[in-house]
Image: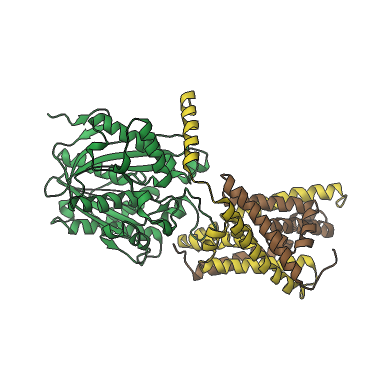
Chain colours: A brown, B yellow, C green
């Protein structure tokens, strides 16, 4: 684990804005110029994030851009692979099967809980 | 399909292409950039907040993503997120809040067919593929990483 | 016996079945649209107090049927047949309305072309004296169609410029051989044409060839030209499909000019954010039974040709890679 920067600086916000915005702008270019649906693009970005994560490249981007790399769905793919690799280090083969939700479990559970809550409280509008 | 039909279809598809207005590329890209950038900036604020509490970067990442997912779900419930996506495009879809939106939107929509076979069964109708392919690709990558680096030998 | 068939695909009605009453109902977005003032009954809540959009659509359809009946002296018992169609799986809006109406029911599916298919079949039956009065109705609902054909409503989708907005509403008409009203004089039932359009975002493009084919066939069968009609109305081609339609018709040698109007392209105002325009069974139905009939009573139109178009596909068929076929039916209304 690389040294963990605990203080928030203005430049962090700027980097998050620029990198996060750029990732979304690339996705928009793909959406406008192909027949791919948003679901296809979400999957593609997740997979690319996981691959770059496995190669150790995405973590460098996250070190630089912070939330700009963590918040796009590619960061979610990276979080799956990072969790998996860290669990493999800890548990061996078992980690390959338990690691996917090591980091992302928190988010997936939040999505289920809040998604259900919203579904109970609200209904779709035109 | 015979040759004449294929030619006719190709010719017609060219006509359709000409008749369809081009997307407003520049405007769409700028709006996606701004929307995505702003969501990530909010994410950075959350990240900074949690970095003061959480012991490791990995855990901060998890809690930041989870908090943004919760915010995305609330924005969806209030009917704000589909408006944001209509203008921000991929700027709203690509951040983790967009992933959360797909779960919440499906839950809200299919609740009408009951909590088990509707909401429960179809909540991940769009988010499911993201999880499935995220996990499959991670599994393959991690496997090779583990074998090649000797972690598992 | 007089010759009831004309040319290859056209039928000529000699007993002149009449549209003796018509009723339209629609939601709030349609209320503020260009057709708003032509719609009889406007509801402020597109869910009309129901829990689901499917139930809401059914309620709209049933209400339109009741309103159409109320404008005549007829009751359910005097109506020999109810012909209904809609977009939902197994045409549930029509069949459940038929259950509540208690009239013998013929369910039809021609996607968004259903209203003209229904009026055409109704005219056939009345012209053949197999019924004195027939009720024809179709409906569609934005939310119900979105969830069936596309995505959950609140999903983060940025619509493409070619997307069309399903009209929320319903329309009904009573076709009878007794009474007053505009006459249905001809019907041209169309062929299914497929030019290989695969994206459900390009429905107007998928339907335009069928519309052009039916129109040209009608001109040929009846030996008429655009000049013989006050208005040539198409259902829901939208702004892109309309352009393609006009071009295809021109290639076949007919110039439509200002005679042509597409309900889908016309209905919504640009600021209403409906992409390429309206669509759905209610779109052409509101155009024909709302706009056209009212303008006919005002004396603006005397002879119109209405062509309603439908895109024939299902979510399963396009996910399996099948292209989207189009169909178009035309009727001539004279008043």
Name the side, left or right, on which B52 lies relative to C234. Answer: right
Give how far across and how far down residue C183 sits, in percent. Answer: 17, 44
Query: Picture coordinates of residue C288 (x, y %)?
Result: 27, 49
Q: Residue reaching furthest front?
A: C257
Quarter of the image for residue C33 reads bottom left
| Figure check: C249 above or below B72 | above
Q: Quadrant of residue B99?
A: bottom right
Q: Toward the viewer: B152 or C75? A: C75
Residue sitting farthest toward the top:
B3
The residue under the point 67% across, 52% down is A45
From the viewer's perspective, tell me whether residue C105 is left or right of residue A69: left
Question: Can residue A4 be seen at all in this image of the molecule?
Answer: yes
- Which of the two residues, A87 or B1, is positioned nearer the viewer here? B1
Eyeballing the image, is A117 above or below B118?
Answer: below
Quadrant into which the N terminus of chain C falls: top left
Q: Is residue C86 visible?
A: no
Q: Position of residue B131 (x, y in %)?
A: 65, 55
The foreground one among C131 and C294 is: C294
Name the spot of residue A120 as percent of width and height, x first: 50, 69
Looking at the rendered structure, the number of numbered marks drawn on it comes to 0
C277 lies above or below C252: below
Q: Residue at x 72, y 74 (%)?
A: B49
Vertical comparison of B28 with B11: above or below = below
Query: Measuring 53% from the left and 49% from the top, which residue is drawn there?
Result: B23
> What residue appears at the point 14 percent right and 46 percent down from the top-left corner?
C132
């Amino acid at each position: 684990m690389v040294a963990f920067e605990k203080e928030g600086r203005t430049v962090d916000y700027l980097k998050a804005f620029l990198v996060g915005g750029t990732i979304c702008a690339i996705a928009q270019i793909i959406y406008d110029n192909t027949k791919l649906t948003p679901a296809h693009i979400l999957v593609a970005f997740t997979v690319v994030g996981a691959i770059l994560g496995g190669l150790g490249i995405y973590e460098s981007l996250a070190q630089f851009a912070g939330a700009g790399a963590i918040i796009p769905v590619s960061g979610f793919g990276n979080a799956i692979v990072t969790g998996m690799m860290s669990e493999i280090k800890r548990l061996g083969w078992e980690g390959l099967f338990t690691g996917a939700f090591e980091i992302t479990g928190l988010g997936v559970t939040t999505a289920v809980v809040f998604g259900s809550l919203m579904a109970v409280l609200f209904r779709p509008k035109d | 399909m015979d040759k004449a039909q294929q030619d006719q279809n190709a010719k017609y598809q060219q006509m359709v292409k000409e008749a369809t207005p081009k997307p407003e590329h520049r405007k769409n890209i700028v709006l996606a950039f701004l929307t995505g950038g702003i969501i990530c900036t909010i994410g950075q604020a959350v990240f900074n907040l949690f970095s003061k509490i959480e012991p490791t970067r990995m855990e901060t990442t998890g809690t930041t993503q989870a908090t943004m997912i919760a915010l995305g779900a609330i924005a969806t419930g209030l009917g704000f997120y589909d408006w944001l996506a209509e203008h921000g495009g991929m700027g709203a879809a690509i951040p983790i809040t967009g992933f959360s939106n797909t779960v919440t939107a499906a839950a809200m929509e299919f609740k009408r067919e009951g909590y088990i076979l509707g909401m429960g069964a179809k909540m991940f109708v769009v988010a499911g593929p993201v999880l499935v392919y995220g996990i499959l690709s991670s599994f393959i990558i991690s496997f090779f990483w583990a074998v090649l680096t000797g972690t598992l030998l | 016996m007089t010759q009831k068939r004309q040319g290859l695909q056209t039928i000529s009605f000699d007993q002149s079945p009449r549209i003796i009453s018509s009723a339209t109902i629609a939601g709030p977005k349609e209320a503020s649209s260009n057709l708003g003032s032509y719609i009889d009954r406007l509801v402020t809540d597109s869910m009309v107090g129901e829990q689901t959009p499917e139930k809401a659509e059914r309620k709209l359809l049933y209400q339109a049927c009741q309103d159409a009946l109320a404008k005549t002296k007829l009751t359910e018992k005097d109506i020999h047949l109810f012909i209904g169609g809609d977009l939902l799986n197994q045409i549930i809006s029509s069949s459940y309305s038929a259950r509540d109406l208690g009239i013998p029911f013929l369910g039809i599916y021609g996607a968004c072309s259903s209203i003209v298919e229904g009026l055409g079949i109704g005219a056939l039956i009345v012209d053949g004296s197999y019924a004195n009065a027939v009720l024809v109705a179709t409906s569609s609902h934005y939310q119900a169609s979105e969830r069936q054909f596309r995505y959950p409503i609140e999903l983060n989708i940025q619509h493409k410029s070619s997307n069309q907005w399903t009209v929320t509403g319903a329309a009904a008409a009573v076709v009878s051989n007794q009474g007053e009203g505009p006459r249905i004089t001809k019907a041209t039932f169309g062929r299914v044409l497929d030019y290989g359009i695969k994206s459900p975002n390009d429905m107007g493009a998928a339907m335009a060839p069928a519309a052009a084919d039916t129109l040209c066939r009608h001109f040929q069968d009846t030996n008429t030209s655009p000049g013989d009609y006050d208005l040539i109305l198409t259902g829901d081609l939208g702004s892109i499909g309309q352009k393609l339609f006009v071009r295809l018709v021109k290639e076949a040698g007919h110039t439509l000019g200002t005679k042509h109007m597409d309900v889908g392209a016309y209905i919504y105002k640009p600021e209403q954010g409906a992409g390429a325009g309206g669509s759905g069974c209610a779109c052409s139905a509101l155009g024909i039974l709302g706009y056209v009939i009212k303008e006919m009573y005002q004396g603006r139109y005397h002879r119109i040709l209405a062509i309603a178009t439908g895109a024939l596909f299902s979510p399963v068929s396009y996910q399996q890679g099948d292209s989207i076929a189009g169909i178009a039916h035309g009727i001539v209304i004279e008043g």
